[in-house]
Image (spheres, grey):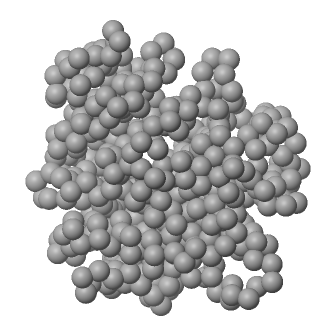
């Protein structure tokens, strides 16, 4: 999502141009999936370091570079390697790092959920020989199931240094969010402001139910936490200014202007000049736009970068980024794309979901989020249960995929990636429930957790 927009921002409407530039033509409905996982040493389950040459991320990257398929991405000219990328038939694929050395696959845009599944399989196959030779094992859960904070590395990325200093001032679990959480994010296209606002509204209001359906982080530091989604709990205590459900966007009259107005008053982290990061924590973007900072004045690139440092459950940029779901196993990760695609890209299901969610006010939804973290699909608040809502949304998603009719070579439509999870949801269970099955009384709990969360 790079930009060369170094031109000054002169008026409020300049800020809205970025959203308008994301409008796609009718029928353009691509899926961009980003998925994270934790690396541990195969021999002992300890976290993979960043710079350890045998079992560290740099050694892993160097062996991938030796294949000739990948190119390094540096944090700044002459700086450390913080990602690899390669060209794919439909666009670029990138392997990048989150602050605690979580490995993220930023996939190329795909036309179908089948493409998402194939891309993930190809990615895991591509890294498998190098992972085995480096002694690295990958874990898939929304929260690191084994590591304590003192054992996790910090990836030497300048923006992470700034965020590391800032987060403790605005929440109690921002550092856990940075290093101990992992997610699956799916990005969607929109054709107009009206289309974007409806998809954003449905995604935000459906996010507690979606988080419950896919809850997949019941472990921390080698023990059972008593929560179904520790990741969801962490996000509740990270930075309430820039996270959550965005009440101003949930009404039928919401607009790009409303989103921009909210974003303007969120404190910045930093901006870039000449490829270098300039720390600017605490100044709202509105003040930067009006007053500048140390002789620098706001440019469109700064606005685009600022938007990328906001973390609501659905984020608006040139695409809509659905961000509320725990990292999943290989078998269930395509289901995340399938669930959202069935709801968002089928007009009938989108309209039905909008109507279904109309009776859920923001106060109820916000109260539901900590209960989802605790109980998954058994969450209740004010006499209302998330389970019937989750089941209805799942049915709408399946119906939407059926109407899309996108088939693979075997003649199966995209529902093939969602039916297993749909059966689990129908039974009132989430992935965390499967991880916890028979866990009581296991003689070696850490080894059991390692086995159950390994990809």
The quarter of the picture where the N terminus appears is top left
Q: Total marks drawn?
A: 0
The residue located at (22%, 42%) in the rendering is 262
Drawn side of residue 394 relative to residue 11, left or right: right
Residue 133 shows up from this direction: yes
Direction from residue 256 to residue 166 in the image, left or right: right
The residue positioned farthest toward the left in the image shown:
253
* Residue plotted at (38% across, 70% down): 370
Q: Where, by quadrant of the figure, is residue 364 drawn?
A: bottom left
Q: Is residue 400 visible?
A: no
Nearest the eye: 319 or 417: 319
- Image position, residue 441 (x, y; %): 74, 88
Work out whether 444 lies above or below 437. Answer: above
Which quarter of the image is occupied by the C terminus? bottom right
* Residue drawn at 35 percent across, 37 percent down: 307
Decide if residue 450 is on the left or right side of residue 135. Answer: left
Q: Position of residue 267 (x, y in %)?
A: 32, 35
* Quadrant of the image occupied by residue 450: bottom right
Q: Which corner quadrant of the image does residue 85 belong to?
A: top right
Query: Which residue is most to the top?
Result: 295
Q: Position of residue 356 (x, y in %)?
A: 22, 76
Q: Residue at 45% across / 24% down in the picture?
A: 279
Residue 107, percent from left and from top: 56, 47
Q: Is residue 227 above or below residue 257?
A: below
């Amino acid at each position: 999502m790079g930009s060369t927009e170094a031109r000054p921002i002169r008026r409020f409407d300049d800020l809205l141009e970025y959203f308008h530039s994301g409008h796609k033509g009718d029928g353009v409905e691509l899926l961009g999936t980003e998925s994270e996982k934790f690396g541990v040493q195969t021999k002992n389950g300890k976290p993979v370091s960043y710079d350890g040459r045998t079992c560290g991320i740099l050694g892993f990257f160097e062996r991938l570079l030796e294949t000739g398929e990948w190119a390094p991405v540096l944090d700044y000219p002459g700086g450390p390697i913080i990602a690899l990328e390669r060209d794919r038939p439909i666009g670029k694929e990138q392997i990048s790092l989150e602050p605690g050395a979580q490995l993220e696959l930023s996939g190329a845009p795909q036309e179908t959920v089948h493409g998402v599944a194939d891309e993930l399989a190809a990615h895991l196959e591509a890294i498998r020989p190098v992972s085995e030779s480096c002694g690295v094992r990958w874990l898939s859960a929304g929260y690191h199931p084994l590591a304590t904070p003192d054992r996790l590395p910090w990836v030497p990325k300048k923006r992470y240094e700034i965020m590391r200093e800032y987060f403790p001032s605005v929440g109690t679990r921002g550092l856990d969010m940075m290093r101990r959480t992992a997610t699956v994010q799916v990005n969607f296209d929109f054709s107009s402001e009206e289309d974007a606002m409806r998809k954003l509204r449905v995604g935000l209001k459906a996010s507690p139910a979606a988080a419950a359906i896919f809850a997949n982080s019941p472990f921390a530091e080698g023990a059972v936490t008593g929560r179904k989604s520790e990741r969801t709990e962490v996000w509740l205590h990270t930075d309430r200014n820039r996270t959550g459900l965005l009440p101003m966007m949930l009404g039928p009259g919401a607009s790009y202007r409303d989103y921009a107005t909210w974003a303007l008053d969120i404190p910045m982290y930093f901006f870039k000049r000449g490829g270098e990061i300039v720390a600017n924590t605490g100044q709202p973007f509105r003040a930067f736009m009006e007053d500048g900072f140390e002789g620098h004045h706001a440019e469109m690139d700064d606005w685009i970068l600022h938007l990328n440092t906001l973390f609501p459950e659905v984020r608006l940029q040139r695409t809509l980024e659905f961000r509320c779901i725990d990292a999943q196993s290989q078998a269930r990760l395509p289901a995340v794309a399938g669930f959202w695609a069935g709801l968002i890209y089928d007009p009938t299901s989108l309209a039905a979901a909008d109507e279904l969610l109309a009776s859920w006010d923001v106060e109820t939804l916000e109260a539901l989020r900590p209960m989802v973290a605790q109980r998954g699909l058994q969450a209740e608040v004010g006499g209302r249960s998330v389970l019937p809502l989750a089941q209805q949304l799942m049915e709408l998603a399946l119906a939407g995929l059926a109407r899309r009719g996108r088939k693979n070579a075997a003649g199966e439509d995209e529902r093939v990636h969602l039916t297993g999870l749909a059966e689990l949801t129908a039974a009132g269970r989430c992935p965390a429930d499967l991880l916890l099955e028979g866990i009581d009384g296991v003689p070696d709990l850490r080894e059991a957790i390692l086995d159950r969360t390994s990809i």
